[in-house]
Image: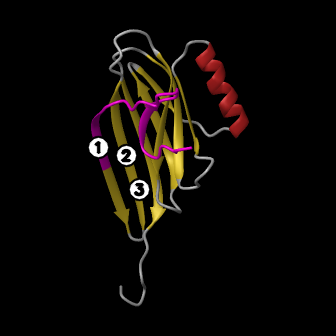
Amino acid sequence: MAYHICGLYFVNLTQQYLPVVDIVTHTTILTTTFRTKLIQTFFNPQANGAIEQLRYTFPLYDGVSVVGFTCRIGDRTIVGQVKDREKAKQDFQDAVIRGERAALLEQFPNASDVFTTTIGNVPAEAKVTVEITYIGELKHDAEID
């Protein structure tokens, strides 16, 4: 089984990727730590009907912590909240069943440094913007610095 490790793709047999239309990143460094905001925008080229489920998968450096998550689907903005894993999955599934646009961010089950976001009910010809903010510690050698 092949694992996707970067991009936004259909969760079906074809696993077709949505095109990336914009990428913005900003990193702030403060002594021995960093904070990075990664914003990626994708486009749903389908002219008819919503996409029931997409998956956005991205790798992160070992040891970083995700501290912010926002997903914009068309005109709806979803701001991430920390919840118990099972409760978060159930809330996501309930929202998708109700036909609402929803997103769920979780750690990839087969790799601790890969995160995955499941996105539900993306309208035809809509843009999807995923914004991830993460922090980490910079490596340094005290003997050299």
Residue at mark 3 to residue at mark 2: CA–CA distance = 10 Å
Tell me residue 130's x, y (percent): 41, 35
Residue at (44% x, 32% y) in the render: 9
The amino acid sitting under disc 3 is Arg
Where disc 1 sits, the SS reads strand
Residue at mark 1 to residue at mark 2: CA–CA distance = 6 Å
Residue at mark 1 to residue at mark 3: CA–CA distance = 14 Å
Q: What is the image's colouring?
A: secondary structure
Give the farthest residue toward the top: 48
Do the numbered discs 3 and 2 sit on residues whose CB atoms are within 8 Å? no
Tell me residue 142's x, y (percent): 43, 86
Which is more N-terminal, label 3 or label 1? 1
Residue at (33% x, 16% y) in the render: 125
Do the numbered discs 1 and 2 sit on residues whose CB atoms are within 8 Å? yes
The amino acid sitting under disc 2 is Leu
Q: Is residue 130 above or below residue 121?
A: below
